[in-house]
């Protein structure tokens, strides 16, 4: 379904926010990512048509920003910061043990399609390392002062919630 | 001391609009709009000596005065892209003291004659943006944003905009490109944003912490503001302390506070009883300060302000103080910082794009123990050739830690590369 059919009010609100139509591209891309966690070619084509851009230009924007994804992955992306401040407080070890416990490598997705683990750059949570953000479509939440045990509990809770849907 | 910026530490519920109002909230905005002329505010901010808190330290009032009076509309854009490794202060302000921040943005709009302000937040701050949207709606409902504010002709509207994960968008012209719906790549300057900014119009771009100072300056005047800090670096600053300290976190302290007070009094000293070895006072973009038995007291007694940090071979930047203990080696540190810059280089200019690619090849090889001292020299040469030749500051920043690590910690490189 097209974005304008699926989210008519939100698309209008986005256009009303800016004096220039093109500025709507980033919020529209988030909308396109909401449902399935990645942006399909059809969505890029629709956004390009709405904004009078080439699809290639829209794809270049998707490619430029690390929070947009053009390939399907887990429903939830656990994105662990391993930059210098977090690394000084054990982020690399945390990530390694987390991968071992979940049973996948960085960049991989659990067989049930629930979780993908990714390594990302600084998230401005340096004093509360180890930390990660959980990306779910167009939404993000921070999880700070984390341990592997706490993260495994979170993954279990997500798994249960998903099973009930 | 009581806080000017992190007031939620003194008044925990200040993110509630009624609590904020009970504690003087919006009185500065009312004073500005009803009892002051825009030019008067610009002059007061100039006199306060407030300097940009995003890292560059440029005088805020001077920046505002560059906007031409002949071209309209003017825009205010708040840089809430906070992405420098080690920096996490703006997030705390926006989460915990949001109305003071928004009042500051509104005051800046009035001061520079802008009716619209955009707050550009990094995409990871999605919940923060949701929260700010709710605060903005509440301010509109209560007449602190919108039309005919306080019975005047003044209209001010604020909107949030989310980035999507790109450090470069903290660079002000890249931020404008991103807000205009393009890839976040810096523009060639001149023209500067003050003349040709957002949508080609005069634009002032200020950091979250900078703008959050304005309610205090309007209320207490420049003299009141200058009771904190030093002559050339007035006011308080939020120091983001991270790395190998016992109590990492944000500490709002007068500019000119010493490293010793921050790291040992507030930060509780070095973790696990280890020794302090290095400080990166401006995040990953820092020149690395070496701390050893000879330099310990000199570094510790250095006041952290825009002038004095230079005396120990670095810069204050955004005051994101990363503390490194003696269990870490600098070949590891620069491999981390270059992984970051390589990932975040926007690809527009060749020295930065290719330079960071080659620097990463070399830092990985050195850190893995597969390099010779010739590789270390080559790394230093690559960094030296990049410096001053890039389109924006990111390129220069990427070379700082590399060059100072090689120069100031030669034993770390001899250890891993000397034998091969």
Image (tube, grey):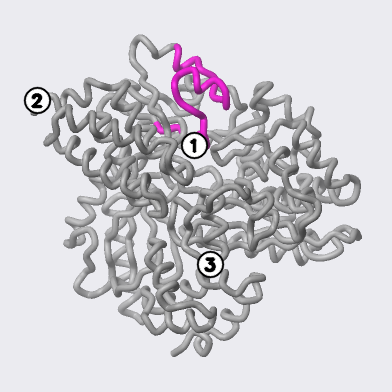
Q: Residue at x 55, y 52 (%)?
A: B173
**A56 relative position to B62: left or right:** left
**B346 relative position to B51: left or right:** left
- Tell if the residue under mark 2 belongs to the same chain as the one under mark 1: yes
Q: Position of residue B159 (x, y in %)?
A: 65, 63
Rounded to the nearest angstrom, the CA distance separating label 3 from label 1 is 31 Å
Q: Would you say the residues marked 2 and 1 are in contact, meaning their CB atoms lie under 8 Å apart?
A: no
**Which residue position holds label 1?**
B240
- Tell if the residue under mark 3 belongs to the same chain as the one under mark 2: yes
Mark nearer the N terminus (3 vs 2): 3
Q: Position of residue A23 (x, y in %)?
A: 57, 69
Q: Residue at x 76, y 50 (%)?
A: B68
Residue B174 in view (yes/no):
yes
On-image quarter of the N terminus of chain A: bottom left
Mark nearer the N terminus (2 vs 1): 1
Mark nearer the N terminus (3 vs 1): 3
What label sits on residue B181 in the rendered view? 3
Crowding at mark 1 (Cα within 10 Å: few <14, some 14-19, many 20+): many
Q: Residue at x 43, y 67 (%)?
A: A61
Q: In the rendered structure, the residue with mark 2 lies on which chain?
A: B
Give the quadrant of residue B397: top left
What label sits on residue B419 in the rendered view? 2
Q: Is residue B5 above or below residue B191?
A: above
- Depth check: B347 or A73 in front? B347
Q: Position of residue A53 (x, y in %)?
A: 49, 77
Q: Which residues are magenta?
A: B298-322
Q: In the rendered structure, the residue with mark 1 lies on which chain?
A: B
Rounded to the nearest angstrom, the CA distance separating label 3 from label 2 is 51 Å
The answer to if B154 sits in the magenta stretch is no
Q: Would you say the residues marked 3 and 1 are in contact, meaning their CB atoms lie under 8 Å apart?
A: no
Give the quadrant of residue B9: top right
Rounded to the nearest angstrom, the CA distance separating label 2 from label 1 is 38 Å
């Amino acid at each position: 379904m097209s974005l304008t059919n699926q989210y008519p009010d939100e698309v209008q609100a986005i256009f009303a926010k800016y004096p220039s139509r093109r500025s709507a591209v980033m919020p529209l891309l988030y909308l396109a990512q909401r449902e399935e966690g990645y942006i399909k070619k059809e969505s890029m084509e629709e956004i390009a048509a709405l904004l009078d851009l080439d699809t290639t230009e829209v794809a270049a924007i998707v490619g430029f920003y690390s929070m947009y994804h053009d390939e399907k992955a887990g429903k939830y992306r656990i994105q662990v910061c391993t930059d210098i401040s977090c690394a000084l407080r054990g982020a690399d070890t945390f990530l390694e043990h987390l991968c071992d416990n979940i049973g996948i490598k960085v960049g991989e997705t659990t067989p049930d399609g629930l979780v993908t683990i990714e390594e990302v750059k600084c998230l401005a949570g340096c004093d509360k390392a180890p930390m990660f953000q959980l990306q779910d479509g167009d939404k993000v939440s921070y999880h700070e002062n984390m341990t592997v045990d706490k993260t495994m509990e979170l993954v279990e809770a997500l798994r249960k919630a998903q099973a009930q849907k | 001391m009581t806080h000017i910026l992190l007031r939620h530490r003194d008044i925990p519920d200040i993110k509630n609009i009624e609590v904020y109002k009970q504690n003087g909230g919006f009185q500065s905005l009312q004073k500005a709009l009803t009892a002051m002329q825009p030019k008067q505010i610009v002059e007061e901010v100039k006199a306060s000596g407030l300097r940009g808190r995003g890292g560059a330290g440029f005088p805020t009032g001077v920046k505002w005065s560059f906007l031409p009076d002949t071209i309209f509309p003017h825009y205010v854009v708040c840089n809430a892209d906070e992405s420098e490794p080690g920096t996490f202060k703006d997030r705390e302000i926006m989460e915990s003291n949001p109305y003071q921040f928004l009042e500051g943005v509104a005051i800046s709009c009035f001061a520079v004659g802008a009716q619209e302000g955009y707050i550009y937040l990094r995409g990871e701050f999605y919940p923060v943006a949701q929260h700010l949207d709710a605060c903005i709606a509440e301010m509109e409902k209560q007449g602190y944003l919108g039309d005919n504010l306080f019975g005047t002709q003044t209209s001010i509207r604020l909107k949030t905009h989310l980035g999507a994960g790109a450090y470069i968008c903290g660079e002000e012209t890249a931020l404008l490109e991103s807000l205009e719906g393009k890839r976040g790549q810096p523009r060639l300057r001149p023209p500067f944003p003050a003349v040709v900014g957002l949508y080609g119009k005069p634009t002032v771009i200020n950091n979250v912490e900078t703008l959050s100072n304005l309610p205090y300056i309007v209320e207490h005047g420049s003299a009141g503001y200058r009771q904190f800090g030093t002559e050339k670096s007035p006011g308080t600053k939020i120091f983001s302390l991270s790395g190998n300290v016992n109590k990492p976190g944000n500490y709002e302290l007068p500019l000119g506070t010493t490293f010793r007070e921050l790291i040992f009094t507030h930060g509780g000293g070095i973790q696990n009883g280890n020794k302090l070895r290095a400080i990166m006072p401006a995040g990953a973009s820092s020149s690395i300060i070496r701390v050893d038995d000879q330099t310990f007291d000199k570094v510790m007694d250095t006041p952290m302000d825009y002038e004095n940090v230079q005396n120990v071979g670095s810069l204050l930047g955004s005051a994101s103080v990363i503390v490194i203990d003696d269990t870490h080696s600098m070949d590891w540190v620069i491999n981390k910082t270059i992984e970051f810059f390589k990932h975040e280089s926007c690809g527009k200019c060749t020295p930065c794009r290719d330079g960071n690619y080659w620097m990463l090849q070399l830092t990985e090889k050195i850190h893995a123990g597969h390099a010779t001292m010739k590789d270390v020299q080559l790394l230093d040469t690559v960094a030296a050739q990049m410096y001053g030749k890039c389109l924006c500051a990111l390129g220069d920043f990427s070379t700082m830690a590399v060059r100072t690590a090689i120069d100031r910690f030669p034993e770390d490189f001899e250890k891993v590369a000397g034998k091969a």
